[in-house]
Each structure stands twice: as C-alpha cells, then as structure tokens.
Image: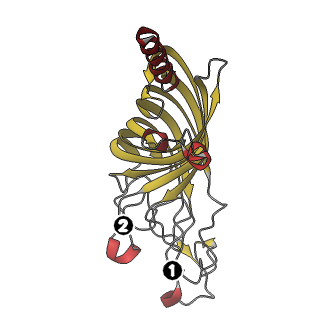
Amino acid sequence: MKRTLTLIVTFFIGAANVLAQSQFYNIAIGVNAGLTTAFTGLNYDEGLAAFNSNKKSLMINKAPSFGVSLDYYFTPFLNAGVEYNINQLKDGPDKHNRQFTSDFSTIELRAGVALGQFVDYRYNDILYLLRGLNLSIGYGILSGKNKVKPFIPNITVDKGGIDKTSDLNIPESERKIYNPAGYRQHAGDIGKEKLENVSVIPITIGYNHVFYNQYDEQKVLLGVNLKTVFTSSDDIDGFNDDPKVYNNKAKDMYSVFGISLKYMFGTRSLYY
C-alpha cells in the first residue's frame, strides 16, 4: 500500500511538472512596415508673415519604413536580435521655409522583453491578454543622405514667398532673402548632405498577438509597435543652424509607427 501511494504521488508530481512547462521555438524571422515622423530642428512656432500658415500636423509629412529582422528567443518573452530597415523621412516647410527629404538605412542590435516574463498569467484573464506588451532597446548605425540643396545667394523673394529677381513695389528695406523650400536658407548653415555611420539608439514599445500551432507552441507573432530613434546627428534633416536663432537645441530624432510579423522556427526549448 505504501509503495502504491508513493507511485501515485510521484505520478502527480511529474504530471504537474509537465503541465507547468511548455516548448517554444528559439528563432524568429520577421518583416515590418510603418510610417515615420520627423522630430528635428524645424520650427513651426510663431511663423514669419510669409510662412505663418505652416503648421506641423499629425497626418502630413509621413514617409514609409520597411525592415527585416532575425531574433533568438531565450524564453517566449525574452529575445535579442538584429534588424535592418530602409527609411524615408520628410518634413516642412517650417516657418523659415525649410523643407527636407532624407533616405537612409539602419542596422540595429537590440534586446527585448515582454510582460509575460514577469507575471504568472495562467490564472488571470487580464494578465493573459497583456502578456504580449513588450519593450526593447538597442544600438545601431544610420547611413544615407538628404536632398537639401546648398544656399543660393542673391535671391529676392517678396513677403508672400514668391520667387522674384526684383519687385519695385516693395521697398528695399522690407525685402527678404529666402531660398526656395528644400534649400538651406543662409550661407552659415553647416548642414551636411551625406549621413555616414551615425550612431542611433532605438527604443520600441509594442504589443504582440500570438498565433499557436497544433502543439500549443507560439508560431507567429503579429505586432503593433511604436519605435523612437534617437540619433547622434543634427544633419538628418540637412539643416544645422545657430541654435540661438533657429531654436535648434537638440539632436535629430524620429519615430516609426507600424506593424511587424514574425515566424518562429528552428530548435525548441522548454519554458517553465
């Protein structure tokens, strides 16, 4: 009888251990797409008379971003990987008639973790739904160029922003010198066209919805993500002006709001 009880207890302990663990795939390959928003030195506050209608709007000056990724999952909620992205960034014209388009690529190394790593979600419906909330941080390199053209001296433009070589109806003292949008607006702008090996720090918050296979293993991750990329350059937008005059006091940054799709495969590990 004692031996029988020992066998029963051993069986249930073993069964509990099996139920408490699950298998997961270690490798994920993914694609992503989104829309970028620029946060650079362009200024929309208290615009000049000629440009005071220029305002930064949530739904304008968006540009595409596409990427691929490769990740290794240490647990279903803890991963590290590499990501390559092709981005476009655009903005303007601002109150100084500055406008730009930049095309560049980034390669990023990053590590990420999801809420499910820290909570026991098996017996709580809310935590079960929220287990896919995630955060990642990384380091990368940005390279590319912008399309901002050099300053052109001796262009006279009237207050309405119309290019003219001369206008006798406007007194000389009231005439302003503005280059067309997409050009540097004065000779002292030291902005660069080429972007080479610019350091970036991407921080991403997101949510992954998991699709399981017939063995209850996570197989596909569908994500919604907001990534903010801090750069070490002030030339992403092609302008690098005196911060006292142009309110240009910080390095350029941008965000990408988009979706991602990851397919998991390869070796498996146990998760307890």
Residue 260: x, y in percent?
A: 59, 36
Instruction: Describe the element under mark 1 as helix, strand or loop.
Output: loop
Q: Residue at x 50, y 60 (%)?
A: 183
- Give the residue pinned by disc 2: 241
Is residue 33 in sight in this rendering?
A: yes
Residue 124 in the image: above or below residue 182 = above
Of labels 2 and 1, the one closer to you = 2
Who comes first in sequence, dot 2 or dot 1? Answer: 1
Q: Quadrant of residue 247?
A: bottom left
Which class describes the residues within 10 Å of circle 1: few (<14), some (14-19), or many (20+)? some
What colouring does the structure picture have?
secondary structure
For the N terminus, give its image quadrant. Answer: top left
Residue 151: x, y in percent?
A: 44, 61
Residue 179 in the image: above or below residue 255 = below
Q: CA distance from mark 2 to mark 1?
A: 18 Å
Instruction: Describe the element under mark 2 as helix, strand or loop.
Output: loop
65 to the left or right of 253: right
192 to the left or right of 179: left
Disc marking residue 176: 1
Residue 187: x, y in percent?
A: 37, 65
Q: Quadrant of residue 169?
A: bottom right
Q: Residue at x 43, y 65 (%)?
A: 41
Dot 1 amino acid type = Lys
90 to the left or right of 2: right
Viewer-side residue, 115 vs 143: 115
Dot 2 amino acid type = Asp
